[in-house]
Image (cartoon, coloured by chain):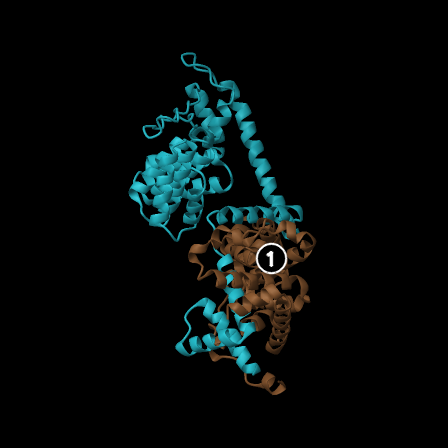
Amino acid sequence: MAADTRSPPVLRLVGATPPERPDALAGVARAAVAGDGSAVRTLLLSIGPHILNVVRRVLGPSHPEIDDVAQESSIALIDALGRHRGESTVTFLACRVAALTAMKARRRNSARKRQSIRDDRSSVELLPSEAPGPDTELSAQASADAVRRLLDLLPPEQAEALALHCVLGYTVQEIAEACQVPRDTVKSRLRLSKRALRVHVLGDPRLAELVERSS
Amino acid sequence: MSADSDVIDDVLIRARRGGLSESDKRLLRDALSTSTDSRLLYQAGTVFDRDARVLPDDDQRIERMVRAVQKHQARAPSVWRARRAVPAMAVGILFAAGAVAAFELARPLLEPNRASPPPAPTSVSSSVRPRRSVRVSQPAEPPADTPDSAQSPPPPAPRPPVWSSRGAEVLTRAVQPAIRREPALTATQLFAKANRARVAGDSEAAMAGYQRLEAEYPGSPEALTAQLSLGMLYLQHDQPSRALAEFRAYRAHSSGPSAAEALWGEAGALRRLGRNAQERAALGELVARYPGSAYAVGARKRLAGPP
């Protein structure tokens, strides 16, 4: 295992992200932090869809608090931008802040989760016509629910790695670069969170059956 | 093993983004058939990607986010903002005071024209605020039994303020800087202005803007799109006949992606009018012509329910 861990990294393809360019939103972000109302509007018109996207991923598309958490994320973003020194793009920072804010909201509400979270399977977007098949659909939904539940339970660093990788869809390399964290650290956190996910799923007979049946 | 796991992790992500090479596709297939972790992560990822869809009313959500941030900043203004705001406020106060003083000086010169009815008490202020005078008032909803023939009666022309000629000249010179006549706007500007009003929740101004756009630039792409927005606003304001006319006018000229939304609106208007058979026909057409649209899902649910 140790030898495996030291083996050469990853993919060239993944590493071959586009060369660094000046962040197009950096200027407007600075003006927004300084209190320029039109800059706030411009910034949020640009990255608002990303924030909503991330909040929906983390909370689920029918969660009743999507609006509130998106607004909370926007405010948290403006505060975070005040401390931002260009380590990552403004868009990535917005996604990260939104993910953390949404995870915080999930944890805050975990006590009344059963009441507050609607059944995602009844969502308009998830009705059957586009689903590949009932079993696959059910299994995928169960896996997503398991990941979301795990975000409430894991240590914050592991939860963030899982959220950025699995929920938001960033590669390990992208997370390491944007978060200014060693790549091995990201891999380690991700490995631990995946192990926790496996234990969580396989420990639940219903989930385990679903996942195994879909294989 | 670990390196393979890293490779697979990234292949799973890139598969969700689309555009895998043939060898990566093979890797993905192998991983999904042999690894529980990969299967879990990939399946969950596809659900997360689907959950992240943009919804039709996201622009309103984003507008609420803007307001939340602005409110937050207003509560805790930074030193920089305070420094900038003080001179700006001083200039504004001085300017407003000058305008008021000039108006007070000119007041004795104003005489009502005896041949015309006396101006309403708000005439003076409305002349200084031209935006109020161009706003089109909404006539009442026509009877529900004649929706298709319903035509908007022309909006009442704004009553011009009545001044004696000398008084008007003096006033004009005195407060000229404070008066900003509504400039001629392009179709794009009118459309953007109406959209801003709609997003800000000022439905009356939004409807007036869309109506003006349709009147001044008939046949323009903006006017065509405005029909859709106007239809939705009419529907929200319980004017289904007018809404129906707008949606049908839109569909008569457009078969683009928003036509599904127009059909959905048309069905909603017909439902409000109690024309259930026509509503179901519209929903059926929606499902048949735009099966992949978000509105088709709602249409199917509605069709599956009681008529």
A213 above or below B148? Answer: below
Give the residue drawn at x 57%, y 60%.
A94
Task: Place residue B221 in its image quadrant.
Answer: top left
Relative to A67, is B110 on the left or the right? Answer: left
Asked if residue B149 shows in the view, the reply is yes
Residue type for callout 1: Leu
Image side of residue B57 versus residue B253, left or right: right
In front of the other: A58 or B99: A58
Looking at the picture, how far across and down is residue A140, in whole percent?
52, 63
* Residue B179, percent from left and from top: 47, 33
Q: Which chain is brown?
A: A
| Chain cyan in the figure, letter | B
Image quarter of the C terminus of chain B? top left
Question: In the depicted view, which residue is nearer to us: A141 or A178?
Answer: A141
Secondary element type, mark 1 = helix
B23 left or right, relative to B34:
left
Q: Which residue is mark 1?
A: A77
Q: Is residue A88 visible?
A: no
Query: Could you say where residue A128 lies in the image, as x and y percent from the top left?
Result: 45, 55
Given residues B266 and A212, the one toward you in this image is A212
